[in-house]
Image (cartoon, rainbow, N blue to C red):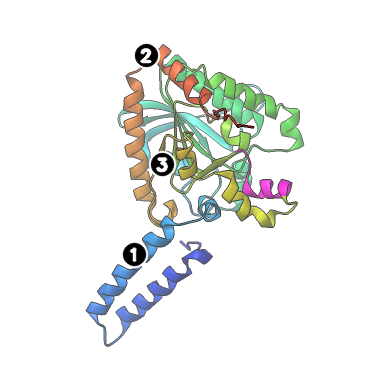
Amino acid sequence: MSITTYEFEKPILELEQKIRDQESAESRDETVLEEMRDELTRLQKDIYAQLTPWQRVLIARDKDRPRALEFVSALMSDFIEIHGDRCFGDDKAIVTGFATFKGNPVAVICQQKGKDTKDNISRNWGMAHPEGYRKALRLMRLAEKFNLPVIVLIDTPGAFPGIGAEERGQAEAIARNIREMFTIETPIICIVIGEGASGGALGVGVGDCLLMLENSWYCVISPEGCAGILWKTNTMASAAAEQLKLTSADLKELGIADEIIGEPDGGAHRCPEKTFENVSRSLEARLEALSGMDTEQLLDRRYKKYRYMGRFVDVLVEE
């Protein structure tokens, strides 16, 4: 697999090449090699710990980053997909179904991007139509009926803005999901695994916990969209990303994200197995904590979680 490399990774690549050269040299020096490997480890930690918001956006969009169904395959078993919204059709950008996690049945909602051009066309690049959101709500109501927790894997550049989607009630479908998810009488855990853009993400994003992978992002608008509005050019996307407070660290500090799930240095695509392990551990702990709550406590806690977001403090200014 050919892994995408970014401008900020060039010092790492150069040092890795020097290490390979030293390893293949006839006068191979093990002491020098050990020092270079230690330096590589330090360099990787320094660079990946200081990524800018825009650099994290790029990693979140990486073509090799694990997709939602890869998480399902790695973490769960016995997955059975549920198709269609019983109204119009089956939206492949959102995959829903039932599975087993750590021996317990769960309901799963996946925002699914493709891995190549053909797959992306089939999945509409992870941009759902209204029937996708209605399918997700249908699954949540089934999960409520059978008292199953709902796990939502969020990864979308936004809801599909096409004419057909608007004609079939895109805004209404998203708004209805947001309202209804406050009333679902079973635990809901949302995990942002890549991009969480606009209402496309929020349409399945109301839950008891919001977990974010370290290099994921979650915001009302994409950096390019914001730059286009403010500066009339998407070349200012990196500046917009700085101001939008869209990274996992920003959202944890603001009290929107409940937990940041660590990724391997360089991103989830560098070592998917480690990423899956980290997500599994966090998900198991959250499910265990929520399972002890009764319905009234669960819904009250969910309401307060969102009600307290965006609070502001009155400041008295002396004249």
Residue 228 vertical placement versus 85 (above, below): below
x, y percentage for residue 86? 61, 21
Residue at mark 1 to residue at mark 3: CA–CA distance: 22 Å
Taking the magenta stretch, the answer to whether it contains residue 228 is: yes
Q: What's under tag 3, amino acid-wise?
A: Ile
Range shown magenta: 220-230
Residue 166 vertical placement versus 296 (above, below): below
Q: Nearer the viewer, residue 282 or 54?
A: 54
Q: Residue at x 33, y 25 (%)?
A: 289
Residue where numbered disc 3 is placed:
260
Q: Quadrant of the C terminus?
A: top right
Q: Residue at x 47, y 41 (%)?
A: 69
* Label 2 secondary element: loop
Q: What's under tag 2, amino acid-wise?
A: Asp
* Label 3 secondary element: strand
* Label 1 secondary element: helix
Residue at mark 1 to residue at mark 2: CA–CA distance: 47 Å
Q: What's under tag 1, amino acid-wise?
A: Arg
Left or right of residue 230: residue 212: left
Q: Nearer the viewer, residue 30 or 308?
A: 308
Taking the magenta stretch, the answer to whether it contains residue 269 is: no
Residue at mark 2 to residue at mark 3: CA–CA distance: 26 Å
Q: Residue at x 40, y 27 (%)?
A: 106
Residue where numbered disc 1 is placed:
42
- Whether the residues at callouts 1 and 2 have beta carbons within 8 Å, the answer is no
Estimate how packed mark 2 is, as few (under 14), some (14 to 19) or many (20 or more) residues with alpha carbons within 10 Å: few
x, y percentage for residue 206? 52, 27
Q: Residue at x 26, y 83 (%)?
A: 28
Left or right of residue 265: residue 246: right
Residue where numbered disc 2 is placed:
294
- Whether the residues at callouts 2 and 3 have beta carbons within 8 Å, the answer is no
